[in-house]
Image (cartoon, helix red, strand yellow):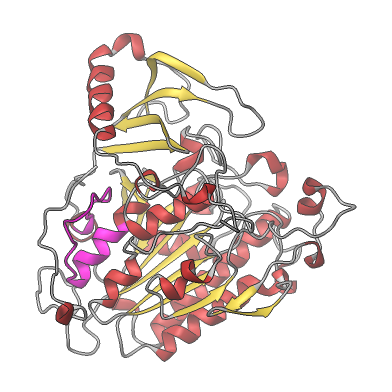
Amino acid sequence: MKIFNINLIASVGLLFLMTTCQQHPGEAQKDKGSFTNFIVIFCDDLGYGDLTVFGHPTIKTPNLDKLAYEGQKWTNFYTAASVCTPSRAGLLTGRLPVRIGMCSNERRVLFPDSGGGLPESEITIAEALKRAGYKTAAIGKWHLGHLPQFLPKNQGFDHYFGIPYSNDMDRVVEDVGYFESCVNPKTEYFNEPLMNGNEVIERPANQHTITRRYTEESIRFIEENKDDPFFIYLAHSMPHVPLFRSQAFEGKSERGIYGDVIEEIDWSVGEIIKTLERTGLDKNTLVVFTSDNGPWLIFNEHGGSAGLLKDGKGSTFDGGMRVPTIFWWKGSIKPKVVTELGTTMDLFPTFCKLSGVEISNDRVYDGYDVSNVLLEGTQSERQEVLFYRGVELYAYRMNEYKAHFITKPAYFSDSAAYHTPPLLYNLSADPSEKVNVADKHPEVISKIVEAANAHKQTLKPVVNQLEIPLNE
């Protein structure tokens, strides 16, 4: 946890300031072509072991492999939560979901009957970057509130094209069970709206073509804004179930339909990189590829793999929150495998640093600027990762050690186990969290407990957005 003590930008007249600093090669400049663009490609339920470059034996991801070889593969990178809504809130605000009311013990994500969403008082990456003149687009799954006041165009995004929540929601079929409808799906089973701005343009959305259309929309935005700095948040709907892929990818993967879906996402990445190269933007665009949480293991072959990590989506074991992550910035990032700790919340301060945007000191941020790690290979300031499930702190990682205060099955159980002393794992030696070493390192447990208690003192009561009913 880190509090940024930077002067608040008080003048409304400075809302669209541009920096002329040259502390990093990618900082935004007034001169055309010298700014840094940002593209975040955010998958849904992609597991740590689902890419070739992260160890999958049959799913072929040549475009992502190339990005990893030319850029940086981060092997200790985490999300803000193990399920959709809080994870996305953490990425876009740089703050733990518990600070902003975007997590709950009762309803783990937002639903079509939810009345809440990302509070207007929060500052998103898009809102911050607009201070430096950035054009901004949210393409894909949103899941931070489907009511007009919560949609992307009211959260700093100039453009929105996508679905407002998970692709298994708005299920309308009555004679087919939920699991059956997800593993043998038809488009008409789900009355999912596809939106352009705040308008529904297709319902139900044709999910067979949705990955391709997200890709085409991203390419169009790049081409239309190639003379301006831009930020694209491309949040794919998949591989969250139900799985759909376009006709060109049917039966393409040895891994079956799940592999087909991943290989189409890999194709999408390749098309976006080709567009950057064609428009001459490849050397001033930072691309980040990652996932919102681990694989949804309860769906068996329709879910992914966490590789050697324990458990998956919904869990606070590493399989639920450690995700495959690649940073690519041609000519600026030195290719390497990075074992430093990082989280999706670090993107907010990092993008602000690289664009010259100051961060206000009126709130606690949980992200760290990792631009020096990317550009200079220095050690990250981040030494901890917090693992929340709902509003409770279940686990805490400090450097290589991770302590579990509470453990609970990811799904289908109300029983939680409370551990005194906490379970303790050395993740450098034991990434699968198999060997409890608590009895050997009581001093480590003491440090972690002290740090966890100090962190809890920084929390303030907030309205729980996930528990607000639609008609309140």
Question: Outermost residue toward the front?
Answer: 472
The part of the chain drawn in magenta is 347-371
Task: Look at the picture and state if 109 lies above or below 318.
Answer: below
Residue 18 in sight in this render: no
Report whether 212 appears left or right of 170: left
Depth check, front residue: 264 or 170? 170
Which quadrant of the view contains residue 67? bottom left
Is the magenta region chiefly helix, strand or loop?
Answer: loop
Depth check, front residue: 282 or 354? 354
Q: Quadrant of the N terminus?
A: top left
Depth check, front residue: 79 or 67? 79
Which quadrant of the view contains residue 222? bottom left
Q: Residue at x 55, y 71 (%)?
A: 268
Residue 114 in sight in this render: yes
Task: Look at the picture and state if 282 lies above or below 189.
Answer: below
Depth check, front residue: 327 or 62? 327
Question: Outermost residue toward the right?
Answer: 175
Tally of marks: 0
Q: Residue at x 16, y 56 (%)?
A: 361
Q: Within the magenta stretch, is there residue 378?
A: no
Report whether 60 appears left or right of 273: right
Position of residue 321 measured from the top left corner of the image (x, y, whole percent) = 46, 42
Which quadrant of the view contains residue 383? top left
Position of residue 244 measured from the top left corner of the image (x, y, whole percent) = 71, 63
Task: Look at the picture and state if 97 lies above or below 124.
Answer: above
